[in-house]
Image (cartoon, rainbow, N blue to C red):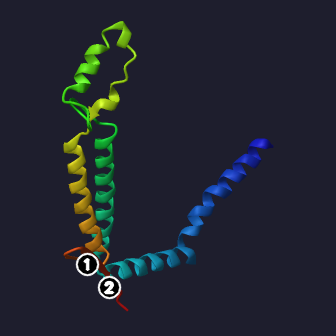
């Protein structure tokens, strides 16, 4: 009895999709797909929108690179700030002595200037794309930068 009920349920569920293939819902879906494709084909592609999002991504990547150049990826070949030249190397050399073994020398590492200025350049390129993609223009004048956003009706 159990297998007969199972067989009837399998047949019922297997035939339902076959019978539904030519129902009005499928015609409606086909009509909606055709209408959406026609609407998409008639809409002109917007390069401004792509420039906006590309600029946003470049700006974030540039800012991240600049911050990483200042923090996590410091270089060991020179010293930072007001520390004398070679202070980092001297600190590391002193760590061999047991008295100075606890020295924390990481604060003396110099900024990674290549990453810093590379990130600034990429961020500036991203800002330019962002401004261009948002129908916005920037005017640079002595002592001022004006950003103008045009709204079209």
> Residue beneath label 2, please?
150
**Of 4 and 104, which appears nearest the observer?**
104
Quarter-of-image position of residue 59: bottom left
**Of 51 and 110, which appears nearest the observer?**
110
Residue 45 seen:
no
The quadrant in which the C terminus is found is bottom left
**Which residue is at 32% across, 8% downward?**
97
Name the secondary structure under disc 2: loop
N-term-proximal mark, 2 vs 1: 1
> Residue beneath label 1, please?
137
Q: Position of 52 compared to 25: left or right?
A: left
**Image vertical order of residue 94 relative to residue 71, above or below:** above
Quarter-of-image position of residue 99: top left
**Which residue is at 29% across, 81% downward?**
44
Residue 29 seen:
yes
Whether tag 2 and tag 1 are in contact, CB under 8 A, the answer is yes
Name the secondary structure under disc 1: strand
**Which residue is at 36% across, 81% downward?**
38
**Image vertical order of residue 7 relative to residue 18, above or below:** above
Residue 119, horizontal then vertical, whole percent: 25, 51
Query: Badge 2: how crowded within 10 Å, few (<14), some, or many (20+)?
Result: few
Query: Badge 1: how crowded within 10 Å, few (<14), some, or many (20+)?
Result: some
**Image vertical order of residue 53 relative to residue 3, above or below:** below
Residue 150, horizontal then vertical, whole percent: 32, 85
**Image vertical order of residue 129 relative to residue 10, above or below:** below
Cα separation, mark 2 vs mark 1, equals: 8 Å
**Of 113 and 29, which appears nearest the observer?**
113
């Amino acid at each position: 009895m159990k297998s007969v009920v199972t067989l009837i349920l399998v047949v019922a569920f297997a035939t339902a999709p076959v019978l539904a293939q030519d129902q009005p819902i499928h015609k409606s879906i086909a009509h909606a797909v055709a209408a959406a494709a026609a609407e998409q084909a008639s809409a002109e592609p917007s390069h401004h929108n792509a420039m906006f999002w590309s600029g946003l991504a470049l700006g974030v990547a540039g800012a991240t690179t600049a911050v990483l150049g200042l923090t996590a990826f410091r270089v060991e070949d020179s010293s930072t700030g007001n520390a004398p030249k070679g202070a980092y190397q001297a600190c590391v050399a002193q760590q061999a002595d047991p008295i100075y073994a606890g020295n924390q020398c990481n604060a003396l590492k110099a900024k990674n200037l290549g990453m810093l200025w590379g990130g600034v350049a990429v961020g500036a390129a991203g800002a330019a794309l962002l401004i261009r993609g948002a129908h916005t223009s920037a005017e640079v004048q002595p002592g001022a930068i004006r950003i103008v956003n045009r709204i079209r009706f």
